[in-house]
């Protein structure tokens, strides 16, 4: 009985052979299995859930001013070409009696980034996850990333960067709150 890893490795072997390479040559003999293991790691977000990830790390707090966590690095895979995009995520929220453990922000980013994605959806998924876990008055997320599908193929633009933002609650309603966040993370308001 084959395992999911065996199945993936078989597909990688077929792809490599389809490219005209010989998977029996020394340098490629173990490549299908290595590539399959790498892909499982790069997409392990499918095996995670928000509840398990947060693990009750939401704490009562009187804090009601903006909390910002910035420069959370992220690595994801473009769902259109299965090539990486790499960048950073900035998250802010306005607590309403509850705060989230600091490391959970990075874990939330990783869980959604480690799936086949487009940056626009990733930004919204992170914002909605933070909102649902904290019941915050507002959540803001900005992601800036470089996409290998734009840099390595197609138009081959090496210095291009994509920026996306999602503003929920008070960040969407209040221009002053939105501007404060964007200034704190070094974006132009």
Image (spheres, helix red, strand yellow):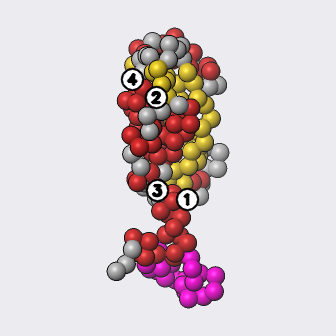
Tell me, for residue 153, which label it has, or none: 1
Q: Are marks 2 and 1 in contact (CB under 8 Å)?
A: no
User: What secondary structure is found at the residue carrying circle 3?
Assistant: loop
Q: Nearer the viewer, residue 61 or 136?
A: 61
Q: Are marks 1 and 4 in contact (CB under 8 Å)?
A: no
Q: Residues within 10 Å of mark 2 (few under 14, many from 20)?
A: some
Q: Quadrant of the N terminus?
A: bottom left
Q: Nearer the viewer, residue 3 or 58?
A: 58
Q: Quadrant of the C terminus?
A: top right
Q: Can I make out residue 52 in this image?
A: yes
Q: CA distance from mark 4 to mark 3?
A: 28 Å
Q: CA distance from mark 1 to mark 3?
A: 22 Å
In percent of the image, x 40 and y 53: which residue is there?
46
Image: magenta residue range: 10-31
Q: Which residue is mark 3?
A: 43
Tell me, for residue 135, which label it has, or none: 4
Q: CA distance from mark 2 to mark 3?
A: 26 Å
In front of the other: label 1 or label 3?
3
Q: Which residue is mark 2?
A: 58
In the rendered structure, which disc, 2 or 3, sits on the residue that comes first in sequence?
3
Q: Nearer the viewer, residue 1 or 147?
A: 1
Q: CA distance from mark 1 to mark 4?
A: 42 Å
Q: Which x, y percent locates residue 127?
A: 43, 31
Q: CA distance from mark 2 to mark 1?
A: 43 Å
In percent of the image, x 43 and y 34: which residue is there?
56
Tell me, for residue 104, which label it has, or none: none
In front of the other: label 1 or label 4?
4
Q: Which x, y percent locates residue 14?
A: 44, 80
125 part of magenta stretch: no
């Amino acid at each position: 009985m084959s395992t999911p890893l065996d199945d993936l490795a078989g597909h990688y072997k077929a792809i490599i052979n389809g490219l005209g390479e010989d998977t029996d040559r020394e340098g490629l003999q173990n490549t299908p299995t290595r590539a399959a293991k790498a892909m499982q790691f790069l997409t392990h977000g499918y095996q995670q859930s928000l509840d398990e990830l947060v693990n009750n790390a939401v704490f009562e707090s009187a804090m009601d001013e903006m909390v910002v966590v910035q420069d959370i690095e992220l690595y994801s895979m473009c769902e259109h070409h299965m090539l990486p995009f790499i960048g950073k995520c900035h998250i802010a929220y306005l607590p309403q009696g509850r705060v989230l453990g600091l490391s959970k922000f990075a874990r939330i980013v990783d869980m959604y980034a480690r799936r086949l994605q487009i940056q626009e959806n990733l930004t919204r998924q992170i914002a909605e996850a933070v909102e649902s876990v904290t019941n915050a008055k507002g959540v803001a997320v900005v992601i800036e990333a470089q996409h290998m599908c734009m840099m390595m193929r197609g138009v081959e633009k090496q210095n291009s960067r994509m920026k996306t933002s999602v503003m929920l609650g008070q960040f969407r309603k209040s221009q002053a709150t939105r501007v404060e966040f964007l200034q704190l993370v070094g974006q132009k308001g």
